[in-house]
Amino acid sequence: MPPQSPRVTPIPIPAPEKLMETSNLESTASALVPKFTLPKLRLEIRDLNHDGAQTFLTAVTANKALQKAVQSVLSLLYQSPDSPTTTVPPTRSVTLIMRSMPGVAYTTGSDLDGDHKEIHFSLDYIHSSVSNDRKAHEIMGVLTHEMVHCYQYNAKGTCPGGLIEGVADWARLHADLSPPHWKKEATGKWDAGYQHTGYFLDYLEKRFGEGLIRRLNEKLRIERYEEKRFWTELCGRPVEQLWGDYGNALEKEKKKAEDDECVLVDREDAATPTNKDAKDIETIA
C-alpha cells in the first residue's frame, strides 16, 4: 500500500474587512433612523373589480407602503419621537380609501375626530394616468405627499394652502419620489404650492441649514400665521426677499449649466479632427 499523503486541514478564510465594515455601517445607519410609533393603518378598496385596484395591489404591498410613507414623513418633519424641539401630532389612525373619483388624492379628518385621518386615492388616476414602469414610484409619491397632511401643522388654520402643499411636496422630494416632470421655477408667487413651493423650501433648507422645515412646521404648531413676522423670525428676512434670492440662485444655476455645456462642446470639437486634419493624416499614412 503506498504511503498516504498527510491530510491538510483547510484554514477558514475570514470575511473581507470591507464587507464587514459595510455591514456595520448599514447597521449603524439603520440604528440612527428614529423609529416612530405607527398609527393604526387601514385599507378600504371600494371596487375590487376596478382596473386601478388590481394595478395598485400589483404595484405595491399595501401595509409596507403605508408604513414606509408614515416613517418617511415623520423622520422628515420631526427630530425623534421624544425630541423636545419638535412635537408629533396625536394621529391615531390613517385609512387609505381607494375609489373611483376625479383628480388624484386628498386627505381629510374622519367622522370620528381630527386624530383619525382618511386619504382618498383615485383608482382612475392609478390605472390610466401613469405609465406602467412608474406605477409604484408614483403611488408611493402620492401616498407620501398625502401622509404629510396627516402629520403637519397649519398654524391653527391660518397657514396659506400653498405653503401646506409645498411642505408636502418638499417631503416627497426628500423621499426621492419626485416625478420626472417637476422642475424648479421662480415665476409667479412663492406660495403657488406643490413642487413650485416645495423646491423653494428645499432652497431655503440648503441655505439656512438642515432642520429649517422642521422648525417651520413647529412654528405652525404654536402660533398663527402672520407672513412678515413668521418669515423674519424663521429666516431673518421677509419671504419676498427670500423668493427674489431664490430666483437669482436659479439664474446662476442655469448660467453655470449653460457654461458647462459650452465647455463640453468645445472639448468635443477640439478632440474631433477637421476634414483638413483627416486629409493630412491620410497623406502621412
Image (cartoon, rainbow, N blue to C red):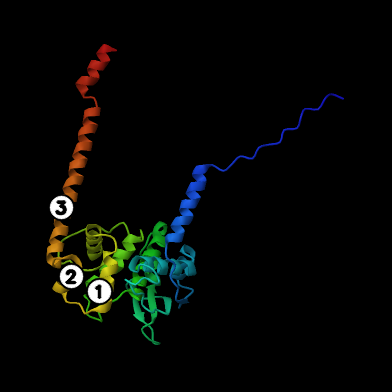
Q: Quadrant of the N terminus?
A: top right
Q: Quadrant of the C terminus?
A: top left
For residue 263, which quarter of the picture? top left
Dot 2 crowding, Cα within 10 Å, few <14, some 14–19, many 20+: few
Dot 3 crowding, Cα within 10 Å, few <14, some 14–19, many 20+: some
Q: Secondary structure at mark 2?
A: helix
Q: Which residue is mark 3?
A: 251
Mark nearer the viewer, 2 or 3: 2
- Residue 49 at x, y = what percent? 48, 73
Q: Is residue 284 above or below residue 252?
A: above
Which circle marks residue 219 in the picture? 1
- Residue 279 at x, y = what percent? 23, 18
Q: Secondary structure at mark 1?
A: helix
Q: What amino acid is found at the position of numbered circle 2 in the picture?
A: Glu
Q: What amino acid is found at the position of numbered circle 3 in the picture?
A: Glu
Does the residue at mark 2 contact the one at mark 1 (Cβ under 8 Å)? yes
- Residue 14 at x, y = what percent? 59, 41
Q: Nearer the viewer, residue 85 or 135?
A: 85
Residue pictured at 43% horizontal, 66% vertical? 68
Residue pictured at 23% horizontal, 65% vertical? 197
For residue 46, which quarter of the picture? bottom left
Number of marks present in the image shown: 3
Does the residue at mark 1 contact the one at mark 3 (Cβ under 8 Å)? no
Mark toward the start of the polypeptide (2 vs 1) = 1
In space, the residues marked 2 and 3 are separated at their CA atoms by: 27 Å
Q: What amino acid is found at the position of numbered circle 1 in the picture?
A: Lys
The single residue placed furthest to the top in the displayed view is: 284
In space, the residues marked 2 and 1 are separated at their CA atoms by: 10 Å
Mark nearer the viewer, 1 or 3: 1
Q: Which residue is mark 2?
A: 233
Mark toward the start of the polypeptide (1 vs 3) = 1
In space, the residues marked 1 and 3 are separated at their CA atoms by: 31 Å
